[in-house]
Amino acid sequence: MIDFGFETTDTTEFDEVENGVYEVYVSACQRKIAKTGTHYISLTLKVRDDVEQEYQNCVVFQNIYAKKGGDIFTRASLEGLVLAFKPQQLVFKTLDDLIEALRGCVATIKTEIKSHQYNGKNYRSAEVVGLKSTNLGAYTPAETVEEDDIELDFDFSKLGGGITHD
């Protein structure tokens, strides 16, 4: 019999970066709608682990909001993303095309820690206060070994019983 063990972690907690400048890549990007009805682009920026720097793999969230109560983004806000992240294509037919093109792109951010209240609770979060293009190349993830890639030197046919094949 083979036993499997799983670890569960609380994914609502994130390691926090401090005030500073970080090389990041867009690990997730999607369009969302706030409770107020305002559309926004939600960026998850991950501190690169292929560059020597503090807080590798920590995330910073940035939201780009449309005009209040609507779904129209200013040209300046979208242009800022394109200039900083430099996606491979520069012409987009739809906002979704731009969002798709941003995934995996790299940039340099400057963060400041801000405190704020929401529903009576105090929160501390890193806010992006500066965004610019980077001279570093594309993000190259560290090589990971998937469990399926591990070769076991064990002959399971001698176990008997269990699973049989016709």
Image (cartoon, rainbow, N blue to C red):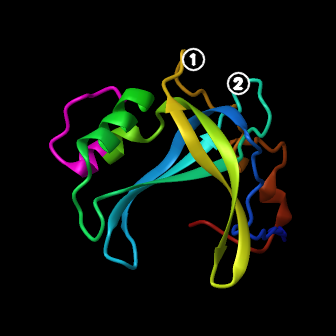
Q: Nearer the viewer, residue 50 or 158?
A: 50
For this orientation, the residue located farthest to the top is 135
The amino acid marked with disc number 1 is: Leu
Residue positioned 31% across, 75% down in the render: 37
Where residue 136 is drawn, which disc sits there? 1
The percent coordinates of residue 70 (x first, y second) are 24, 67
Name the spot of residue 126 as percent of width and height, x first: 67, 51
Please say if 43 is above or below 53.
below
Q: Are marks 2 and 1 in contact (CB under 8 Å)?
A: yes
> Where does the magenta region start and end?
87-98
**Residue linked to disc 2:** 51
Determine if the magenta segment contains residue 95.
yes
The quarter of the image holding the C terminus is: bottom right
Residue 86 is a magenta residue: no
Q: Quadrant of residue 72?
A: bottom left
Q: Nearer the viewer, residue 65 or 2?
A: 65
